Amino acid sequence: DKEAEMVMASLRQIFREADEDGSGDLDHPELRAALGKFRVRDRLKLLQIPYPDLEMLFLLLDEDNKGTIKCDYFFRGVAKLRGLAKAKDLHQLSIDLNRRMLWVDECSEKISEANDILMDMVDHLDEMDTHIVKGESDGKDPVIAARRGREPVSKGRILRGVWKDGRPMRQGSKNPWIDFEEMQKDAKELRKKTASKRRAEAEARKAAEAKPKKKRSEWDDQPTPPPLPAHLQILKADRDRRKNERVVVKQKKKRAFTTG
Protein backbone atom coordinates (compact mmCIF):
# COMPACT_ATOMS: atom_id res chain seq x y z
CA ASP A 1 0.00 0.00 0.00
CA LYS A 2 0.99 3.67 -0.26
CA GLU A 3 1.70 4.02 3.46
CA ALA A 4 4.17 1.14 3.40
CA GLU A 5 5.86 2.56 0.30
CA MET A 6 6.24 5.94 2.02
CA VAL A 7 7.74 4.25 5.10
CA MET A 8 10.16 2.25 2.91
CA ALA A 9 11.23 5.42 1.11
CA SER A 10 11.81 7.12 4.45
CA LEU A 11 13.78 4.10 5.68
CA ARG A 12 15.90 4.15 2.53
CA GLN A 13 16.74 7.81 3.13
CA ILE A 14 17.70 7.00 6.75
CA PHE A 15 20.13 4.28 5.63
CA ARG A 16 21.67 6.64 3.12
CA GLU A 17 22.12 9.21 5.89
CA ALA A 18 23.73 6.50 8.03
CA ASP A 19 26.62 6.53 5.53
CA GLU A 20 28.47 9.25 7.44
CA ASP A 21 31.59 9.31 5.26
CA GLY A 22 29.54 9.55 2.05
CA SER A 23 31.33 6.63 0.40
CA GLY A 24 28.13 4.94 -0.71
CA ASP A 25 28.99 1.91 1.44
CA LEU A 26 27.45 0.95 4.76
CA ASP A 27 29.71 -0.66 7.37
CA HIS A 28 28.70 -2.55 10.51
CA PRO A 29 29.28 0.31 13.03
CA GLU A 30 27.18 2.64 10.87
CA LEU A 31 24.40 0.04 10.75
CA ARG A 32 24.46 -0.37 14.54
CA ALA A 33 24.33 3.41 14.98
CA ALA A 34 21.30 3.59 12.67
CA LEU A 35 19.51 0.77 14.50
CA GLY A 36 20.01 2.65 17.76
CA LYS A 37 17.73 5.45 16.57
CA PHE A 38 14.09 5.33 17.65
CA ARG A 39 12.72 6.45 14.28
CA VAL A 40 14.44 3.53 12.56
CA ARG A 41 13.02 1.03 15.04
CA ASP A 42 9.54 2.55 14.73
CA ARG A 43 9.60 2.19 10.94
CA LEU A 44 10.89 -1.38 11.17
CA LYS A 45 8.13 -2.20 13.65
CA LEU A 46 5.52 -0.71 11.31
CA LEU A 47 6.89 -2.78 8.42
CA GLN A 48 7.00 -5.90 10.66
CA ILE A 49 10.74 -6.36 10.12
CA PRO A 50 12.66 -7.56 13.24
CA TYR A 51 15.73 -5.37 13.55
CA PRO A 52 18.01 -8.30 14.57
CA ASP A 53 17.32 -9.66 11.08
CA LEU A 54 19.09 -6.64 9.60
CA GLU A 55 22.39 -7.63 11.21
CA MET A 56 21.94 -11.17 9.90
CA LEU A 57 21.18 -9.73 6.44
CA PHE A 58 24.33 -7.61 6.63
CA LEU A 59 26.46 -10.70 7.34
CA LEU A 60 24.81 -12.63 4.50
CA LEU A 61 25.28 -9.86 1.94
CA ASP A 62 28.90 -9.25 3.01
CA GLU A 63 30.21 -12.23 1.02
CA ASP A 64 33.83 -11.02 0.92
CA ASN A 65 33.97 -10.32 4.69
CA LYS A 66 35.09 -6.76 3.98
CA GLY A 67 32.72 -5.32 6.59
CA THR A 68 31.07 -2.97 4.07
CA ILE A 69 28.24 -3.29 1.53
CA LYS A 70 26.53 -0.86 -0.84
CA CYS A 71 23.64 1.08 0.69
CA ASP A 72 21.31 0.39 -2.25
CA TYR A 73 22.25 -3.29 -2.26
CA PHE A 74 21.52 -3.54 1.46
CA PHE A 75 18.20 -1.70 1.10
CA ARG A 76 17.04 -4.07 -1.66
CA GLY A 77 17.72 -6.93 0.75
CA VAL A 78 15.73 -5.15 3.48
CA ALA A 79 12.80 -4.68 1.10
CA LYS A 80 12.69 -8.43 0.46
CA LEU A 81 12.41 -9.13 4.20
CA ARG A 82 8.87 -7.69 4.25
CA GLY A 83 5.93 -10.07 4.42
CA LEU A 84 5.75 -13.71 3.37
CA ALA A 85 8.01 -15.29 0.78
CA LYS A 86 6.58 -15.32 -2.73
CA ALA A 87 6.64 -18.31 -5.08
CA LYS A 88 9.19 -16.70 -7.39
CA ASP A 89 11.47 -15.97 -4.40
CA LEU A 90 11.30 -19.61 -3.31
CA HIS A 91 11.98 -20.74 -6.88
CA GLN A 92 15.00 -18.43 -7.07
CA LEU A 93 16.20 -19.77 -3.73
CA SER A 94 15.88 -23.35 -5.02
CA ILE A 95 17.89 -22.47 -8.13
CA ASP A 96 20.64 -20.79 -6.09
CA LEU A 97 20.75 -23.74 -3.69
CA ASN A 98 21.12 -26.26 -6.53
CA ARG A 99 23.92 -24.18 -8.04
CA ARG A 100 25.74 -24.07 -4.71
CA MET A 101 25.32 -27.83 -4.24
CA LEU A 102 26.80 -28.52 -7.69
CA TRP A 103 29.69 -26.17 -6.91
CA VAL A 104 30.31 -27.98 -3.60
CA ASP A 105 30.27 -31.36 -5.35
CA GLU A 106 32.82 -30.16 -7.90
CA CYS A 107 35.08 -28.78 -5.16
CA SER A 108 34.75 -32.02 -3.20
CA GLU A 109 35.78 -34.07 -6.24
CA LYS A 110 38.78 -31.83 -6.89
CA ILE A 111 39.87 -32.08 -3.24
CA SER A 112 39.48 -35.86 -3.34
CA GLU A 113 41.63 -36.04 -6.49
CA ALA A 114 44.29 -33.83 -4.86
CA ASN A 115 44.28 -36.07 -1.77
CA ASP A 116 44.71 -39.16 -3.97
CA ILE A 117 47.73 -37.56 -5.64
CA LEU A 118 49.24 -36.62 -2.27
CA MET A 119 48.58 -40.15 -0.96
CA ASP A 120 50.47 -41.67 -3.90
CA MET A 121 53.36 -39.23 -3.34
CA VAL A 122 53.62 -40.22 0.32
CA ASP A 123 53.65 -43.93 -0.60
CA HIS A 124 56.33 -43.38 -3.28
CA LEU A 125 58.51 -41.42 -0.84
CA ASP A 126 58.13 -44.16 1.78
CA GLU A 127 59.04 -46.83 -0.76
CA MET A 128 62.06 -44.81 -1.87
CA ASP A 129 63.21 -44.45 1.73
CA THR A 130 62.99 -48.18 2.51
CA HIS A 131 63.75 -50.04 -0.74
CA ILE A 132 65.53 -47.72 -3.18
CA VAL A 133 67.93 -45.59 -1.10
CA LYS A 134 70.28 -48.13 0.48
CA GLY A 135 73.51 -47.78 2.42
CA GLU A 136 76.34 -50.10 3.38
CA SER A 137 75.33 -50.18 7.04
CA ASP A 138 71.62 -50.86 6.45
CA GLY A 139 72.04 -54.56 7.13
CA LYS A 140 73.35 -53.84 10.60
CA ASP A 141 70.36 -51.69 11.48
CA PRO A 142 67.55 -53.93 12.86
CA VAL A 143 64.87 -51.25 12.35
CA ILE A 144 65.59 -50.87 8.62
CA ALA A 145 65.85 -54.65 8.21
CA ALA A 146 62.47 -55.14 9.90
CA ARG A 147 60.82 -52.44 7.75
CA ARG A 148 62.08 -54.07 4.56
CA GLY A 149 61.00 -57.52 5.68
CA ARG A 150 57.37 -56.86 6.64
CA GLU A 151 54.42 -56.30 4.30
CA PRO A 152 54.28 -52.69 3.08
CA VAL A 153 51.49 -50.53 4.52
CA SER A 154 50.18 -47.44 2.75
CA LYS A 155 51.05 -44.44 4.90
CA GLY A 156 48.93 -42.25 2.64
CA ARG A 157 45.78 -44.20 3.51
CA ILE A 158 46.69 -44.08 7.19
CA LEU A 159 47.08 -40.30 7.02
CA ARG A 160 43.66 -40.08 5.39
CA GLY A 161 42.21 -42.09 8.29
CA VAL A 162 41.40 -45.31 6.40
CA TRP A 163 42.38 -48.90 7.16
CA LYS A 164 43.66 -51.26 4.52
CA ASP A 165 40.17 -52.73 4.02
CA GLY A 166 38.57 -49.26 3.78
CA ARG A 167 37.23 -48.94 7.33
CA PRO A 168 37.85 -45.58 9.14
CA MET A 169 40.50 -45.48 11.85
CA ARG A 170 39.78 -44.32 15.39
CA GLN A 171 43.30 -43.27 16.30
CA GLY A 172 44.38 -40.35 14.15
CA SER A 173 41.09 -40.51 12.30
CA LYS A 174 40.11 -37.80 9.84
CA ASN A 175 36.42 -38.69 10.28
CA PRO A 176 34.88 -35.73 12.15
CA TRP A 177 32.04 -37.81 13.60
CA ILE A 178 34.44 -40.25 15.26
CA ASP A 179 36.46 -37.35 16.64
CA PHE A 180 33.24 -35.70 17.86
CA GLU A 181 32.16 -38.87 19.68
CA GLU A 182 35.56 -39.15 21.37
CA MET A 183 35.41 -35.50 22.41
CA GLN A 184 31.93 -36.04 23.86
CA LYS A 185 33.14 -39.08 25.80
CA ASP A 186 36.14 -37.17 27.20
CA ALA A 187 33.93 -34.22 28.17
CA LYS A 188 31.49 -36.56 29.94
CA GLU A 189 34.30 -38.19 31.95
CA LEU A 190 35.69 -34.74 32.85
CA ARG A 191 32.24 -33.62 34.06
CA LYS A 192 31.96 -36.73 36.23
CA LYS A 193 35.38 -36.13 37.79
CA THR A 194 34.59 -32.47 38.41
CA ALA A 195 31.23 -33.30 39.99
CA SER A 196 32.75 -35.93 42.31
CA LYS A 197 35.50 -33.50 43.33
CA ARG A 198 32.95 -30.80 44.13
CA ARG A 199 30.86 -33.26 46.18
CA ALA A 200 33.94 -34.28 48.17
CA GLU A 201 34.83 -30.64 48.82
CA ALA A 202 31.26 -29.87 49.92
CA GLU A 203 31.22 -32.85 52.30
CA ALA A 204 34.57 -31.79 53.74
CA ARG A 205 33.24 -28.26 54.35
CA LYS A 206 30.10 -29.63 56.03
CA ALA A 207 32.19 -31.91 58.26
CA ALA A 208 34.44 -29.00 59.21
CA GLU A 209 31.43 -26.84 60.06
CA ALA A 210 29.78 -29.60 62.08
CA LYS A 211 32.90 -30.26 64.18
CA PRO A 212 32.56 -28.54 67.61
CA LYS A 213 34.91 -25.66 67.99
CA LYS A 214 37.37 -25.63 70.87
CA LYS A 215 36.38 -23.23 73.59
CA ARG A 216 38.83 -20.50 74.32
CA SER A 217 40.00 -20.27 77.91
CA GLU A 218 40.61 -17.06 79.77
CA TRP A 219 44.37 -17.67 79.47
CA ASP A 220 44.20 -17.57 75.64
CA ASP A 221 43.43 -13.88 75.74
CA GLN A 222 46.40 -13.03 77.97
CA PRO A 223 49.18 -10.98 76.33
CA THR A 224 52.66 -12.42 75.91
CA PRO A 225 54.96 -11.86 78.95
CA PRO A 226 57.56 -9.09 78.65
CA PRO A 227 61.26 -10.02 78.15
CA LEU A 228 63.52 -10.54 81.16
CA PRO A 229 65.68 -7.65 82.35
CA ALA A 230 69.32 -7.60 81.27
CA HIS A 231 70.78 -8.77 84.63
CA LEU A 232 68.30 -11.67 84.82
CA GLN A 233 69.12 -12.71 81.26
CA ILE A 234 72.83 -12.93 82.27
CA LEU A 235 71.91 -15.15 85.25
CA LYS A 236 69.69 -17.35 83.09
CA ALA A 237 72.44 -17.77 80.48
CA ASP A 238 74.95 -18.67 83.21
CA ARG A 239 72.54 -21.21 84.71
CA ASP A 240 71.94 -22.82 81.30
CA ARG A 241 75.70 -22.99 80.68
CA ARG A 242 76.35 -24.78 83.99
CA LYS A 243 73.48 -27.16 83.28
CA ASN A 244 74.96 -28.08 79.88
CA GLU A 245 78.38 -28.60 81.45
CA ARG A 246 76.88 -31.04 83.99
CA VAL A 247 75.15 -32.94 81.20
CA VAL A 248 78.43 -33.21 79.26
CA VAL A 249 80.28 -34.49 82.38
CA LYS A 250 77.61 -37.11 83.00
CA GLN A 251 77.82 -38.33 79.40
CA LYS A 252 81.63 -38.63 79.64
CA LYS A 253 81.38 -40.62 82.88
CA LYS A 254 78.77 -42.90 81.34
CA ARG A 255 80.93 -43.60 78.27
CA ALA A 256 84.00 -44.24 80.48
CA PHE A 257 81.98 -46.68 82.62
CA THR A 258 80.69 -48.62 79.64
CA THR A 259 84.10 -48.84 77.93
CA GLY A 260 85.89 -49.83 81.16
Image (cartoon, helix red, strand yellow):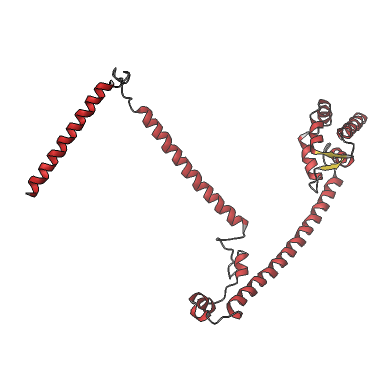
Residue drawn at x 58%, y 55% is: 179
Compared with 232, 170 (above or below) is below
Q: Position of residue 45 (x, y in %)?
A: 81, 29
Front one among 253 and 180: 253
Q: Quick check: 53 above or below 63?
A: above
- Residue 185: x %, y % from top left: 53, 51
Residue 74 position within the rendered picture, expressed as x and y whole percent measured from the top left: 85, 40
Count of numbered circles on the image: 0
Query: At 14% from the left edge and 35% from the top edge, which residue is drawn?
Result: 246
Left or right relative to 68: residue 232: left
| Viewer-proximal residue among 13 and 53 | 13
Q: Nearer the viewer, residue 164 or 71?
A: 71
Give the position of the N terminus as an image quadrant. top right
Left or right, residue 254 beside residue 223: left
Vertical placement of residue 187 versus 174, above or below: above
Query: Toward which corner of the image does residue 89 lie, by quadrant?
Result: top right
What residue do we see at 80% from left, 49% from top? Answer: 64
Q: Residue at x 50, y 74 (%)?
A: 143
